[in-house]
Amino acid sequence: MKTRLTDLLNIEYPIIMAPMFLVSNTKMIIEALNNGITAAIPAMNYKTDKELRAAITEIRKASDKPFGFNLIVNKSNPRYKQQLKTLIELNIDYIITSLGNPKEVIAKCKPLGIKVFCDVVDLKTAQKVEGLGADAIIAVNRQAGGHAGPYPAERLIPQLKENCTIPIISAGGVATHEQLNKILALGADGVSVGTPFIASKECSVSDEYKQAIVEFKGKDIVLTNKISGTHLAVINTPYVQEIGTKATFLENLLNKNRFLKKYIKMLIFNNGMKAIEKSAFKATYKTVWVAGPSIEDIHEIKTVKEIIKQLTI
């Protein structure tokens, strides 16, 4: 399965285990690296610089394969500057930027040979990050878990392929080998896969969360802007139904206030992340389980190795 992504990172299969807030852990990453794919982990998963450094050390002791970190590069992440400094100092293989302008990350990483992949949801943003010097595009489509894009892969990938020159990595809607082949046939150089790995034995989320990934179907995924301030794909639990999926009139009004919107966005994001954290590790009434429509093709809890096998064979 040779593609520009496998050549870029010297990996066997063109697959990134997607960085998942609170879900990704070092055990999952190490299993991914040892089974032919690469993997990334959100820097936000670590509350201190010491914890971030310890995670990198642990992974490097277990594998010499390339792995990366996801950085949220907007003001909702107060630890962004320190996280970037640490990742550069420890010479991480690549960084995936999300929810903001990657200009600083690219400028600081490119001279050092650290690759930068940028989340995009449309052609305009893709062309912008390519112009800044990004090494690859993470094309987030409508089927993605977490922060989803507005367009299906069938529209987004060919459009990017026609107008961009750097590798395109499709994010969203892949849980089987057939789906992987379909995305590559559209012109993608690889895929970023998250949701199937939530239902892995190495994942440390609650059994209830894993079982939800198995039992719910694609039709049970909804997009909400009540949790993080931007569209987030979650399972339509009773609590999600109760709070609704659209911001209220007052929330929209505050979000548009030029003096308050920065603080309102940070408040919504931080409160939403706390709700996701509580739901991820224990049963709670206020259940917010992040996932994508690919749960349709997840029928049992497997090891990371078995999930990679079902994607590649």
Image (cartoon, grey):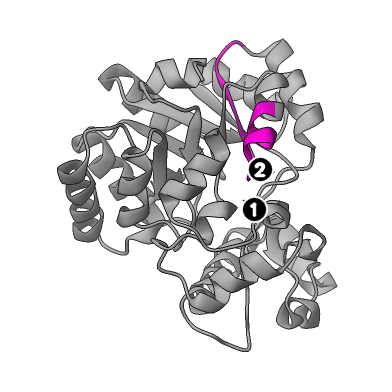
User: Whole-percent x and y of residue 182?
Assistant: 71, 28
Q: Secondary structure at mark 1?
A: loop
Q: Determine if the magenta segment contains residue 176.
A: yes
- Look at the image and give the residue range highlighted in magenta: 165-181
The kind of residue tagged 2 is Gly
- Left or right of 148 in this view: 282: left
* Residue name at image x 68 percent, y 18 percent: 187
Residue at 62 percent of width and 79 percent of height: 287
The residue under label 2 is 172
Q: Position of residue 75 (x, y in %)?
A: 49, 53
x 55%, y 49%: residue: 194
Q: Quadrant of residue 217?
A: bottom right
Q: Which amino acid, mark 1?
A: Gly
- The one nearer the camera, 306 or 164, is 306
Quarter-of-image position of residue 127: top right
Describe the element under mark 2 as helix, strand or loop: loop
Q: Determine if residue 25 is in view.
A: yes
Q: Which residue is mark 1?
A: 145
- The answer to whether residue 275 of the structure is visible from this angle is no
Of all residues, the one furthest to the bottom in this rendering is 285
Q: Between residues 16 and 229, which one lies in front from this camera angle? A: 16
Along the viewing direction, whichever of 294 and 285 lies nearer the viewer: 294
Asked if marks 1 and 2 touch (Cβ < 8 Å), the reply is: yes
